[in-house]
Image (spheres, helix red, strand yellow):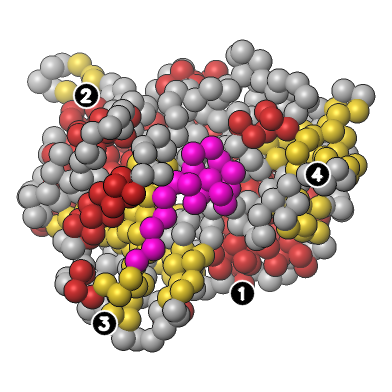
């Protein structure tokens, strides 16, 4: 196993239970991939995902790999409200967790009568897209006939009585313009897709499954931070006698008789293996092999556009949080189109204000005492921006602090210190080029939003994790681990979970 990311560990635990001897080679000094933690002066911060969707993926992992269920190993808390949105015109709305009726009522009250109904109707159509794509996109390996996921848009067309015809949205932005018909609702939808590192103007309408997934299955927090989930998965692996070697960089995948037969480490050591599973980004995987892994027609060999990255600030605040705070607040900019333009072409211009996510977990484990608070601010950014320049970092720091001031009263007066997290930190931790973060795989879009399959042209070599099918995100990484384990244990005839 190359890499100790969440996908690799999910596969390792399952393979160990199936009787395989599993060794994980991780070039850094810890597990979890991008699911990390930063600690200073009694403050603790998640530096990767701060929330969890589809916890059933990890519940299944723990059921299949031992007697202790997930809830015996970590404490899961449903976040309510799921999010508070603060719009540029000053309007704010808190969306209840996993309650369609509650969301409809909240939107009607905050944005005006009819807004909730339009959003509720959108969720119904998003569910239809989810039902059409869930199994082939998430629960089955990506088969050679992957084109069935690339063609017809699964998000349904909407009939228009005045036009006496239906109108089919091609992109998420189309859904906002044609169906939601309110700039704030469109901004709400766009921000939910942008949070996954996807441009709503170019991503297919099938991306509606992402906000639907969060709405239908809820948003969850892991007490102590999401890093605790990585710890629990790592400890499950250790209990199943998976061996971890940290500080062990793989420099080559060894081939013998036309198949993967082991790995070579930086110190020249060669370890033989019947199967090699790689949880690394495509560029690094290509560098480790002696042959091309993809044919010209292989899905996902070259993505439509370079994945986005994230810029984050870790804030240590004096003073207790005010009662009833939202765990997550999304602050919307006045010019979202300018934000998206700059993401695609950062150039040398001054960046416009971005969409900023403010995470304020009310968790004693994350602060030195009840007189302080730890807060994480983040924004989706281009990995191509000039992050090595102090002026770029300073400009983004001010933009995030300005936006967060609309969500956290007296923010700057309460600020003790802050830590900056640029894309280079993610590159150091995960090896992903320029700190890019993979997005979940999506249907339609001519296959450009799918990820490479878990098998490769080199027999015995498998891909796992966010850079492979079914894409990025905590639940998707867990599902990729289940798929790879199934392919190894059951062979090419494995058809996915039943």
Q: CA distance from mark 3 to mark 4?
A: 49 Å
The residue identified by callout 3 is: 319
The quarter of the displayed image where residue 289 is located: top right
Q: Which residue corresponds to mark 1?
A: 72
Q: Are marks 2 and 4 in contact (CB under 8 Å)?
A: no
Characterize the local packing of mark 1: few (<14), some (14-19) or many (20 or more) Cα atoms within 10 angstroms. few
Quarter the C terminus occupies: top right
Label 2 vs 4, first from the N-terminus: 2
- Mark 4 is surrounded, within 10 Å at the Cα level, by few (under 14), some (14 to 19) or many (20 or more) other residues, namely some
Question: Mark 2 highlights which residue?
Answer: 159
Closest to the camera, between mark 3 and mark 2, is: 3
- Name the residue at 45% across, 30% down: 306
Where's residue 139, x and y in %? 60, 40
- The reply to whether residue 447 is visible in this rendering is yes
Sequence order check: which comes first, mark 4 or mark 1? 1
Please state which of residues 369 and 168 is positioned toward the viewer in this rendering.
369
Q: Which residue appears at 54% of the width and 34% of the height?
A: 137
Give how far apart the Cα atoms at labels 4 and 1 are: 37 Å
Q: Nearer the viewer, mark 3 or mark 4?
A: 4
* Span shown in magenta: 418-435
The local crowd at label 2, few if under 14, some if 14 to 19, many if 20 or more residues have their Cα within 10 Å, is few
Q: Is residue 368 above or below residue 273?
A: below
Residue in the image at 71% along x and 52% along y: 26
Mark sitting earlier along the chain (3/1): 1
Q: How many marks?
A: 4
Is residue 431 shown in magenta? yes
């Amino acid at each position: 196993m190359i890499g100790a990311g969440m996908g690799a560990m999910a596969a390792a635990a399952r393979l160990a239970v199936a009787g395989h001897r599993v060794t994980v080679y991780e070039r850094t000094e810890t597990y979890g991939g991008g699911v990390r933690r930063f600690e200073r002066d009694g403050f603790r911060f998640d530096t990767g995902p701060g929330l969890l969707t589809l916890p059933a993926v990890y519940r299944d992992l723990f059921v299949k790999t031992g007697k202790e269920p997930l809830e015996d190993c970590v404490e899961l808390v449903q976040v309510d409200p799921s999010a508070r949105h603060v719009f540029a015109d000053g309007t704010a709305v808190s969306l209840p967790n996993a309650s369609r009726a509650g969301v409809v009522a909240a939107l009607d009250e905050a944005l005006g009568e009819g807004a909730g109904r339009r959003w509720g109707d959108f969720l119904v159509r998003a569910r239809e897209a989810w039902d059409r794509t869930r199994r082939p996109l998430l629960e089955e390996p990506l088969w050679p006939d992957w084109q069935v996921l690339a063609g017809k848009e699964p998000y349904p067309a909407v009939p228009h009585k005045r036009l006496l015809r239906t109108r089919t949205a091609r992109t998420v932005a189309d859904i906002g313009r044609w169906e939601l018909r309110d700039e704030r609702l469109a901004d709400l939808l766009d921000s939910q897709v942008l949070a996954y590192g996807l441009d709503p103007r170019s991503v297919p309408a099938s991306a509606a499954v992402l906000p639907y997934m969060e709405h239908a299955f809820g948003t969850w927090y892991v007490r102590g931070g999401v890093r605790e989930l990585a710890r629990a998965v790592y400890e499950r692996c250790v209990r199943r006698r998976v061996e971890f070697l940290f500080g062990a960089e793989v420099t080559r995948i060894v081939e013998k008789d036309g198949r993967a037969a082991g790995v070579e480490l930086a110190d020249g050591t060669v370890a033989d293996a019947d199967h090699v599973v790689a949880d690394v980004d495509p560029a690094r995987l290509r560098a480790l092999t002696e042959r091309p892994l993809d044919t010209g027609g292989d899905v996902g060999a070259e993505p439509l556009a370079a994945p986005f990255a994230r810029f984050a600030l870790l804030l240590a605040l004096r003073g207790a949080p005010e009662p009833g705070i939202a765990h997550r607040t999304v602050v919307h900019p006045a010019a979202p189109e300018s934000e998206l333009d700059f993401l695609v072409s950062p150039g040398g211009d001054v960046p416009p204000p971005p969409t900023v996510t403010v995470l304020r977990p009310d968790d004693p484990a994350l602060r030195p005492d009840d007189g302080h608070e730890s807060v994480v601010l983040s924004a989706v950014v281009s990995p191509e921006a000039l992050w090595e320049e102090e002026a770029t970092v300073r400009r983004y720091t001010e933009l995030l602090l300005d936006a967060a001031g609309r969500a956290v009263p007296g923010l700057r007066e309460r600020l003790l210190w802050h830590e900056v997290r640029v894309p280079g930190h993610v590159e150091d931790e995960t090896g992903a080029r320029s700190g890019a973060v993979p997005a979940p795989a999506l249907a339609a879009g001519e296959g450009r939003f799918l990820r490479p399959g878990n098998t490769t042209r080199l027999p015995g070599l498998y891909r796992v994790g966010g850079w492979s099918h079914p894409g990025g995100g905590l639940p998707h990484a867990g599902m990729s681990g289940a798929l790879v384990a199934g392919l190894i244990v059951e062979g090419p005839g494995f058809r996915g979970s039943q």
